Amino acid sequence: MRQLNQLREFMLQSVAELQQHPDKLQIWTDDGELVFKTLDPLPNHRNEYTASVLITDYAGGLESLAMPLMTFIKKYNSQGNDDSIAYEAEIIDHDRADVLFKVKLIDNVNTSVTPDDDIVIDPVCEPTVPWFFDPPGEYVLIVDGKEVARWQA
């Protein structure tokens, strides 16, 4: 579940309001599975789970959260297919909402055996296929003349 920490740091660095109020961001996992092949002599496996990303009392637009989140998925978790992110929102008042995103993540875990028969674990937090996005660089999301998000792709 290394990607949960990566996702948390990415969102905190990318969204202006979360930089100022990191306590508004909560991340946890639901519905996790370890997927492995019983005939594989090594314990290589995938950790598949749904990350719940809750932003509470948020005053920005959905796009200022969704754009960095989609960038993270494309960069670190793309499987080369269409991806989707489920979300729910509870409108608190005219300006604020609690927003919950549900993101499917996969951590691949490769293993090897040393000459001394020790098992070495190598978690891989990167896409299994190449991803294509706009050219690498810094992106800034501006809504109504105000910077609401900034991230590296």
Image (cartoon, helix red, strand yellow):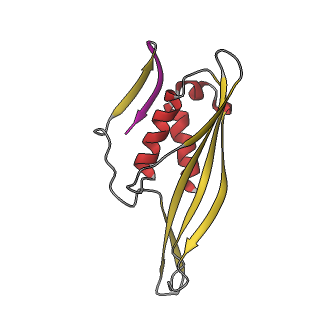
Which percent across, then down, holds residue 10?
51, 40
Identify the residue at image location x=47%, y=36%: 68
Image-quadrant location for residue 138: top left
Using the image, determine if residue 35 lies above or below residue 119. above
Q: Residue furthest top?
A: 145
The quadrant in which the C terminus is found is top left
Residue 63, given in percent of the width and then of the height, sits at: 49, 28
Of residue 3 and residue 114, the one placed in the foreground of this image is 3
* Residue closest to the far right: 92
Q: Give the main secondary structure, helix, strand or loop, of the magenta stretch.
A: strand
**Which span is picked out in magenta?**
145-153
Quadrant of image for the N terminus: bottom right
Quick check: 57 left or right of 138?
right
Identity of the residue drawn at 47% across and 57% down:
125
- Residue 130 in the image, given as x and y percentages of width and height: 32, 55
The mark total stands at 0
Q: Is residue 37 left or right of residue 130?
A: right
Outermost residue on the left side: it is 135
Camera-nearest residue between 100 and 110: 100
Q: Position of residue 145 (x, y in %)?
A: 43, 12
Q: What residue is at 43 percent from the left and 20 percent from the top? A: 142
Residue 58 magenta-highlighted = no
**For the point 35% across and 59% down, which residue is it?**
129
Quarter of the figure with residue 62: top right
Q: Compared to 136, does 60 lie above or below?
A: above
